[in-house]
Each structure stands twice: as structure tokens, then as C-alpha cells.
Image (cartoon, coloured by chain):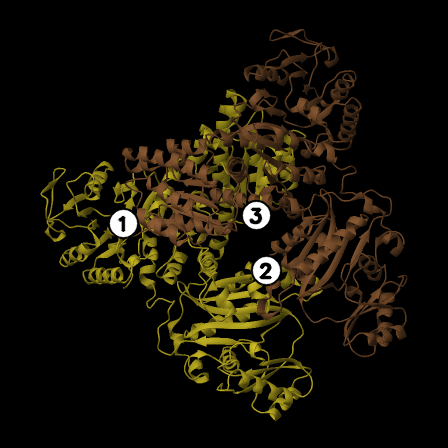
Chain colours: A yellow, B brown
Amino acid sequence: MSDVRDDQRQRILDPDSVAVVGASTDPQKRGHQAIVTLEEGGYEGDIYPVNPGAEEIRGRTVYDSVSAIPGPVDLALVVVPAPVVPGVLEDCADTDLAGAVVVAVGFGETGEEGEALERRIVDLAREHDVRLIGPNTSGMINVHEGLNLVGAENVPAGDIALLCQSGNLAIALFMEAMGVPGRGFSHYVGVGNESDLRFDEYLPFYAADDGTNAITLYVEGMSDGRAFLQRAREVTPDTPIVALKGGRSAVGKESTSSHTGSMAGDAAVADAVFEQAGVVSVERSDELLPTARALGSLPAADGENVAILADGGGHATLAADALAEQGLSVPDLTAETQERLREVLPDAASVVNPVDVAGGTDDDPSVFYDCAAAIAADPNVDALLLSGLFGGYGIRFSASLADPELDAAHDIAGLAAEHDLPVVVQSAYESAEPEAHAVLREQGIPVLESLEVATRSLGALATYGDHCARADRKSDFRLEPGAADDTTLDEVVDGDGDLSEHAAREALSRHDVPLSPSELATSADEATTAADRFEGPVAMKVVSPDIVHKSDVGGVALDVTDDPAGTYRDLVAAAHDHDPDATVEGVLVSPMRETGVELVVGVVEDEQFGHVAMVGVGGVFVEVLEDVAFRALPLTRADARDMLADLDAQELLDGARGTEPVDREALVDLLVAVSGFVEANPRVTELDLNPARASGSDVEALDAAMTVRPAGREESGDPAEQVSEESADD
Amino acid sequence: MSDVRDDQRQRILDPDSVAVVGASTDPQKRGHQAIVTLEEGGYEGDIYPVNPGAEEIRGRTVYDSVSAIPGPVDLALVVVPAPVVPGVLEDCADTDLAGAVVVAVGFGETGEEGEALERRIVDLAREHDVRLIGPNTSGMINVHEGLNLVGAENVPAGDIALLCQSGNLAIALFMEAMGVPGRGFSHYVGVGNESDLRFDEYLPFYAADDGTNAITLYVEGMSDGRAFLQRAREVTPDTPIVALKGGRSAVGKESTSSHTGSMAGDAAVADAVFEQAGVVSVERSDELLPTARALGSLPAADGENVAILADGGGHATLAADALAEQGLSVPDLTAETQERLREVLPDAASVVNPVDVAGGTDDDPSVFYDCAAAIAADPNVDALLLSGLFGGYGIRFSASLADPELDAAHDIAGLAAEHDLPVVVQSAYESAEPEAHAVLREQGIPVLESLEVATRSLGALATYGDHCARADRKSDFRLEPGAADDTTLDEVVDGDGDLSEHAAREALSRHDVPLSPSELATSADEATTAADRFEGPVAMKVVSPDIVHKSDVGGVALDVTDDPAGTYRDLVAAAHDHDPDATVEGVLVSPMRETGVELVVGVVEDEQFGHVAMVGVGGVFVEVLEDVAFRALPLTRADARDMLADLDAQELLDGARGTEPVDREALVDLLVAVSGFVEANPRVTELDLNPARASGSDVEALDAAMTVRPAGREESGDPAEQVSEESADD
């Protein structure tokens, strides 16, 4: 199915007319309640009840079918049971219906029979050019148009769009938003089984929608993650996207023989590729809305330096801790800023960062503004966190402080706008709803009770700002189809499955992937000759497409200094001991390397996102250390640098314990070469360079393992058809 | 100062009479407001205003001084400025005053002059047997007695005691508690500068207090962490303690030359020793109160197996994720349980764990009880999490569901009590305050809006349960003074500072710490003899008390196979090249070992908690891997096992990649031997066995470094005087 057309998407998400298929005279039925909800919500489009067995509902004419409706219909809400849905779609053959929201359960989520029914309705819909939301969806809502097809009452209006794979979670998020003045929704879609319209296909509408400033997702799995990345990358620089991934703990690791495959858990890959596309991931459900609120209403942060303005040592300390947890910095303020703060604060105050007013605002909370003004002018500061009791001075200390507090709120909001400075306020008095908080929120400044939620917002603002500044240097997630003409694999491998190390090396070397030198010896004599050619001790590894784990069968000898011929014979014998039928091509001889930093570089084909690259620390102990980074192919140099920066063991790359620092650009060369190789050879399903060794600018793979799928078979992870460039530009 | 006496502590924290020193006729002054607050709070004890310049305040006689008060006085609230405080205390020489709350700032927190003043008031207080809270404290509150010496209004009453090192954070916690029905405080103490009464000295009172079910701490630093551990260990099995540590991000790492020292950051050590003592640490300020609430009102969990009962797939999935994040398990339910669930739930429901009712409660929320009853009877289940919309059925779906929902709440609470099963409820309708939630809370079942806060509570219940079950096998934190007679150090080292490896080995071997064999060669010939004695290649290391980092100066040769004599001469020459004046005792010769698991075992003297042991993964790369575990000395075998269990790299110990599993009991032997050595030789300030090698049951240190303080100098970290056993029993 090609991507949804712009006009059709518009008619589905902002319809001028809605048919309710399965409309009912019974007020207890959803087919009745849906009409009531539309009426009470103030929906101004046309509403057409459809039910062959009724004549009038709430004074409206009921039609026998969608095709019987006289006027044009944009969207149908289909509330009939699953088995009846195909008939409804068949009836739409000659209508101009743009889309249908199929609420019924009993499709793909229930087993084989349901899957067949789901395929049938998707086929029918495609045949008749109707696009489906669902099935198994709670519905959709266009809040500002009063178009509520969910039946969830009291959805607070706001500027956040929500794409959600759980109806009850949506209800929970609506409830959460109700408790916070000024936070609400513009649109909601329950994507349901995502059998037709996909996550990515909704994004351009929200991006173009004036009423939407941020997009939130709850996603358990995507039917086409690659298309989502392409689309998200286009949208994020203008409209932030925040994603909560469900199923993080699921045993999502595919059955695989490679190190890379075993590390590529669902959530680890999703987090990484989302970040690559500019999508901000949150790990906690209670952070989704606050983070979206901050990203939707505040300017992105230009850097990671946050100033803390606190009215107590405890908040100052805890705020610094929580910011550090977000990877943010609490930099020194300039001497000038400190001097300005000294002028307005008492001696006991701390004017370094974190700033603690130490009672300096007790008699006059407008001093908060004076402090904020000094901080906002500081060139070292990218964002400001006001933490403590602000908003509570008029409540706790003296009612006479409410006015100066209100003034301070106004002035701080003005200051933030003037300096384009993201300001987040954490206040113990959030639940008391003082007017000062309302003023801040009106100006887009979030006020939060939880310090940790507040600092998470600041973390997101910095991540998002960093992405926006560098977005065009990152991958566009489009794999070049032209390069698929590469014949490397056809030449080096006969058929598919696991390649021998020798064949894998041959394929990689044609794409300039740096490998340690090696020679294939096919006899004991050749082994001696090969060993003599390299200085010092050599590694010898049996070469057989039938033996993947060479070490496990005694097929590897390291530090061979004398008698390579004897070693040759031993290795071949070990291989035949393990498997008498194994095809043994010979023994690979390569020089031993002094210890550098041992890495793993690999590629795996992710079920949702297609080919992703990995870099990890620790060679064979990569699974123990769990210090790995992922990015989707194709990698730009910026992506490769980001992968290296994602690793925990930065000291190792920087030259821990007196070792030579690793030349990161040489590692980037390796990663980009691997990316280019796989892009040109999409039949590769798994690739493992383990170990790859880095010592200064000397970077090379010491081993290579590769699995390929048969020629001509479609990739499992990448979409058959990519999002077209044309429709992506709207 | 010896520990506070029980009777004195009782009179301070639950006084029958209070003097307000610095009482004022001015209603704006704290010395006036304090009296108003006591009156309005319903405090029934005697109130004595003290001010030599006033005669009557609010109809009360004002006394010139505390000594002028006719009746007995338990506690004085001292609100006079810092310089006046000594005079107040001098006046108490002949009174029976038990304690004083010193509010003034301007003491140790301000510099040298303030420090002197603080020492002076502590000396005076000791002289006159008055114990001090503060100085620089916001005060204290005995909520149930109406004794509020803080001036914070609206402190909600409840069963949580709060010891806090930040007045404004206390206000924030009071505000947070106000928003949640049924959550509140029994006692509050702002510990201030902790110059006299310490954190630990308050604990026995709260433990004995019927109105207190949980103790919370906000702590930035403790003046005597070791005494706190001793006391906390005694208290925690009956009264849970939850601690929030401020300053986690501070550069708390002492300047040190050892690996162990460099890893012993403030927060890492505090978290570990708190866990050892049964104190539950939270890392987020928004988790402190909810965690305390759960621990104070629910039975501890017998294990880590949690059943999830959700009314939607999203909540079920996210709950499983969040529980996994807490290290908890979501086990399979028994066939019997699944069958019982099948009987009450629709076909679409999931009856494995997580249980998703899939609409089965929509018409009748009392089905929640049926499900909970089936789950509660399941022997695989240690705790239950109810997650989703419970409490909201009567609000969102139909008012007629409010009654069955209320019945379900009652029945679920009854069930929890009957089965002694911890139940935590997460509901999107928490903020709507439905009656069903009130019923649950009355029965001690927490209801939370945030799924992640709810699962944090379950994590704490499991951690706490595990501690309670094993508390008596863990350290009592009492270092045996008798063992200080050990003369090992005096015999092997002349003076103090860094020991040579040879001397360190000698000392350790006397305490059965397993070390690789070694011989000290004092000539090239002796080196040859020594090398011949060991089979295979040897390691040779120069021995000099003046050279700590032997590798850095070329003082180490590994894999020596031929010419040990020449190597001997090279090493000695390298040492003299580095430092012509270095005393070179010789060269240590020891056999090379095949690679096992490389660990670091060490001891460091923590500023707050005294001697703590560390075990870490990775030999010289321990700082890169950051996989370390700490416990305070003396270690029991259970403590040592916990340290090993704390490491991330469990697979490494269990035999990753085909290596032999490590015999954990052999490693425990090593750790306990190290603990015993340092306990007997408290002059040791740092000890590093790096690497220590473990391969199967073959465990030994391959290197040893040690620093000792001069004989006779008091330890910096351990308290001069330990909490007496006698007073600890109350």
C-alpha cells in the first residue's frame, strides 16, 4: 500500500462529515452514544447515522448504508461486530468515503481466523480507496473540532497529539492531563492493530496542524518502523515527538548466533534509532505528558548547561543531582553574574551555581526575577530551573507576598521570551494552584511538583536541541536501492546461510572495511609459508562454512610461534573430529596483535527498523559488559560519532590507564564502511566483527562472521516500499 | 559525647513543657508566632515565654531566663541570635532542662568564627547536660501532641517520622503529603548542623513510638555514619527506614591513589551500607513519601514475585516493564489460578501474568475481587499490583458501578489482610479521590497515580522483606576493639604510609588472605633461584616502599621465561632511574597465572561510615567498567555474598563464554579474611588487591597495596566511641 494521500489524510483526521455505521436507538449502545457525544461536543460537520433496521435516531434520518447517504462522507465510525465489517466496506465501493474507524475486536489479535478477516478488510479497503484506523481501536478524537469518536468524556483540550496503542492508557493520560491546568490534547488516534494506516502516516498531519505543538506516542510495536524513522526525521525539527515504548522488558532478543544479535533487544534498538531520528524517548509513563508539554511550549536548549535558582539548600542539592542524572551540567556562572546576584541576595546566599537565595526572597519574592535576570544574561547558561517554593510565598508566608510573586511570574515569563531561554519551574505549591503558576503556564513555562519530572523535561530540551542543531548531518534512513546491484556476495558465497571467515573477509575487503592481514593456507606447507610472512606469532583459525564457533570446536590456535604446519594439521583434525562431513577450506593465518581496545562492530536486521549497526565494548565479553550502541543504517559520519559517544566506557577510548587514545575518526571510517557494505548487500542479515581492535589510528577487524539470506528473497525488516520523497515533503 | 539517655531523649521529643527563649510581644516575630502555633496546635504541656525585656505575652507570664522558670522544663526553643546562645546555655547550669532547639544560623556553616561558636555551645550544653537540636535548624514537630516548633502550618498528621537536613525540603514534603489523603507525619526534626544530637540518636524514640510506622531521612552528610548503621540495623526489622541522599552528584571522591578509593564515591558507599543495614534508599525526591507509606502500612514481601492485575493491555505491559526495572519478577501463575481466572473473565482476557481482564470488569468491577482472590491464593505470588482504572468505573462508565467498586475495594483490602499479602493499587483516577480509594487507604493499601512510583514501592517491599529475613546474618557494624592488639603491622612495617608489596603480602598472609606464591629476591642470583622454583613463566616486580605504581616506572616484568637475573638488574636499575634515593628491598618473583576472572578487592576508610570493603570487576580497568559493590566492615559471609550478588557481571562469575564458574564461597573466604585483617589492624586506611584472580575455587590476590596511618592516631572514619550495647537495646 502506498502512503496515504495528503487530501485523504486531511479528510480522515479533520472530517467535514461522519457516518456512524451501527447507529442505535438504544441509549446504552455505543452506536447511540457516539452521536450524543458528537452533538454535545459541538461537532459542526454532518452526522449520518447508518443502520438498515432503524429510521430515526435523535431526530436524524438513519440511512440503510453508507452508499445510501446523499452527501459526501469523509469518515465512517464503524461500530458493528467484526464479521459484519467486510459487508460495510463492500458497500463503499462506489462512495467517496476517505476513511473508516473500525472499533471491533476479533481480528489479527485473536488468532488465525481473525487474521484472515483482518487481511480481508484491508484488501477491501484498498480496493475501494478507503483507509482504515484500527481495527481493535478505541477510536479517534479531533479535540478542537469536537469530533470525539472514542466516548471518553472530558478530554482536556490542548496542543498535544497522541498516537496510542492502548485505549486504557489513553484514558489514564486524559485523566492525568485533567489534573494539570493548561495541559491537554489536540488529537488522539488509537492506532489499534495498525493493519492499514501506520504510525508514520499520521505524522505529517500533526506536523502541519496549527493546533498541535507536540506529538506523543505510546508504542508497543510498529508495523513499519523504517517508514516511521524517515517520517519522524522530517517532522521533528519543527514538531517534537515524544515516545513511550511498552514491552521494554519483553524477551525481545531474537534467536541468533551473533553477539550483535544477542544484544539487539527491542527497546535498546528502538531507543537508539528514535534518538537518531530526533524522537525523544521516555522510560516512565509519568514523564510522557510533562516532557511533551515542555518540548511543545519551550524553545529547545542550545546546550546542556543549566542554572539552578533555588530557595533552599535541599532543593539546590537535589536539583543538581537530578540534572546530573539527566546528563546535564551545572556550570559556573560568570563573575559578572555572581556580582549581580550578590547585589540582590543576602550574604548567606550561594551565588555560584546552584544559586541558593538563602532567605533572600522571604520578604520579597520579586527578588526571584532579579536573580533570573542576572542568570538569563549569563552566556554560560542554556536553561534555567527554578526550584523550591515559588508560588507558595503568598500562601505560606504572608498574603501580601502574592502580588510581588505574581509580578515576578510575569517578569520571569517575559525574560524567558526575551532571551529565548527555556525555563522550567519546580514548586512544592503546584497542587495549590496559585495564580503565579497560572501566569507562568499561560506563557508556556511548565510548573511541576516533582523535581525529577522537571529535570527530565530539561534533559529532553537539551537532547532535542542537540538533534535540531545536527539533524541534517544524520541519517535520512533511506537505503539506496541502486547499490543493490553489488555482486560481491554472489561472487564470494555459494548460496546463503553462514559464510566462512575467509569469504566474509573477502566480501568486506571489497568495501574497504579494514581487516587484519590474513592468508588462507590450504596445506601445512602453505601454513608455514604464511606464518613466515608475518613477523612474530600468528593466529590460526580453521576455515569452514559449517563451523561458525571455531573456538568451541578447537579450531583456533593463538600465539603460534613454532610449527605452524603441525598446528595446521591439528586444527583440521579438530574440525573433522567435530563434524566429519564439514567442508574445510583451509586455515586462515594472521598476525597476532598487541592488545588495543577490543570492540565488537556488527549489523543486525531488526524486525521493525530493518538494518541497524552496533558498536560495543569488550570483544567476546560484550554480553557481560552490556556497553553497546545502535543506529539504523545507512550511517552518516555523525551517526557513527554518536554511537561512539553513546558508549559508557569513554575512558577506554580516551586512553584509560596509560593506553594510547583511540582515533575516533578511524573507528568512524570502519563503521561507515560496514554501513556501506550492508547497504550495498542487503542480503546480509547478521554481521559480526568480533573483536575489532583499535589502537591509536590503527583500527581493524580481527575476525568476521556473516549470515546472508538467499538471493532474491525480500528483506524482512525493511519496508518493501519506502515513503515516497514526494509525499514526505508536505 | 556518649549516646543520649532514653529518658532525656523522651523529654526532648515528647516534652511536657516548653520554654520559648526569645519570646516576643511583636506578632511578626518568630518568638511570638511560636507561642501562637503551640496554642493553636492544641499543645497541652506548659508553655513558658522567656525574655528579660518583657512581662506578659498573650496573657502568659514572661520569665527573665530559663533558670527563673518555677516548674521543670523539658525543652527550650531558642530563637535568639547566635551570639546570645552561649549565655542562654550558661544560664541552664542549674536547671533540669533536657534539650534545646537552636534555630539560629551563623555557626559551623559560615566559617571559622562560626565553628568556634558552635564548639562553644556544644561544650556548654555537655557541661550542663542539655542536648541540642541544631543549630541552624528549622526546628522540630511532634505532630500528634500539637507541638510545632517550626512554624510550618498545615503539617498533615500521619505515621511517618521525618529527619531532614533541609527546612525547605521539609515544607515541600508537608505540601506533597497534604495532597494525598491518609499520608502524613508523626514527627519532624530538622537535624541542622548535627553538632550535638546525631541522626542515629533519634531513631530509638521513633522505633518505640506507637504513632510512627516508618522513618524517613533526607541526609546530605552524617556526622557519625557508623553509629547510624549500628542503630538502623537494630531498628529496621521493626520500623522501616527510607533515606533520600542529597549530593549524589557531588565530586565526593577522595583524593586517593588506590582503585578502591577512586570508586568509593559518597553515594555509592552510602547506598550500599544503607542496604546492608536494612535502610531503603530512594534516588528520587518524589519517591520518598510513597515508599515510606508502603513500607509503613504493608507487610514486607516474602519474595520478588509480583502478580499484575490490569484492566488494559497498555497498563499490563508498562507495569511489567516497570517491575523489571525494579529487579522484580512477573512469574507464571499456577494452572489452578489460571483456571479460576478463566471462570470469571471473558475469553479475550489474559490469565497468565500479567493478567489483563480485557473488559471483564466493565459491567461489574467486583470481578476485580474475584481475580484478586484467585491470585492471592497462588503460592507463586509474593505481592499484587492492581493497575489501570480501578476507582474510576463509577465515574467514567456508570454511576451504578460505584457500589460494586466500593465492595471490591473492601473485599480486596480484606483479602490482603487475610493472606498477609502486600497489595499496591495504581489508578488513573487517583486525583478524582473516589470513595473506593479511601476505603483501600484506610486499610493501609496505597493508591498511586504514577505506575513507576507504585512499582518503586513494590521494589522497596521486596528489598525490605529480603533484609528482614536475613538481618541477623548481616554485619552488626561493630568492629571488635580487642583485636586492635594485633601486632602484624608493627612487625612488617616501619612507620606508616605506603607499604611495599612484600610487606603488604606478609601482613595479609598472617590473616589467611590467599595470595599467589612469591619470593623476595634480593640479588640477581636469588631471582634465578626463585624463578626456577616456580613452573613456567614468572612475574617480577620491584619491591620498594617508595614506589607505589610499579608499572609506571618500568618496575614490572611479566611472562619472564629466560634470564631472570638480567631482568632483576633491569628492574632495579629502572627503580633507581625513577628515584635515585628509592629504597629497593629487592624483586618479588611470582608465577604467572592463566587468565581467570580478574577482580579488585579492596578496603577504604569512608569519611562517614569508616572502613568499607569493595569488590569490583575488571582488574586495572575497574574505573572504566564501574561494576563494583561495597559493604561496611566487619563483613559476615552473608554480606560478602551480597557484594558478589550486587555486581552487574553475574555471567562472568557464573562462567561466561565457556570459562569455569567461580566458586563464590572461595571468594567469600577472601573477602571475609580481608575484613578480619583490617578489623584487627584498623590503622589500614587503604587496601587494594588488584588484580585478585578467581578461577573455579582457585582464588588469590596477585598483587597487594596498602596504606597505613601512624600507630596511635585515631581513625578518621570510625566513631571514637561506639553506641553502647546497653542503650541500643531499648
| Whole-number angstrom distance, CA of label 3 to CA of label 1 | 39 Å
- Whether residue A43 sits left or right of residue B317 in the image: it is left
Of the pair B59 and B474, the residue shown nearer to us: B474
Residue A322 sits above or below residue A587 on the image: above
Residue at image location 82% in from the left, 42% down from the top: B714
Q: Amino acid at mark 2?
A: Gln
Residue topped by disc 3: A325
Q: Amino acid at mark 1?
A: Leu
Of residues B346 and B113, the one nearer the viewer is B346
Query: Can residue A324 be seen in the rendering of this structure?
Result: yes
Same-subunit check for callouts 3 and 1: yes
Q: Position of residue B721 (x, y in %)?
A: 78, 37
Which SS class for mark 1?
helix
Picture quarter with the N terminus of chain B: top right
B581 vs A647, left or right, is: right
**What amino acid is labelled 3 in the image?**
Glu
Which mark, by number, is residue A13? 1
Residue B222 lies, with reference to residue B585, above or below; the image says above
Residues packed near mark 2 inside 10 Å, few (<14), some (14 to 19) or many (20 plus): few
Label 2 residue SS: helix
Q: Going 57% across and 60% down the picture, which residue do you hit?
A: A647
Give above or below for A83 relative to B201: below
Residue under pointer 2: B650
Mark nearer the viewer, 3 or 1: 3
Tally of marks: 3
Q: Given the image, what chain letter belongs to the residue carrying mark 2?
A: B
Return the x and y of residue B100 as percentages of the image width and height.
Answer: 70, 22
Disc 2 + disc 1, Cβ < 8 Å = no
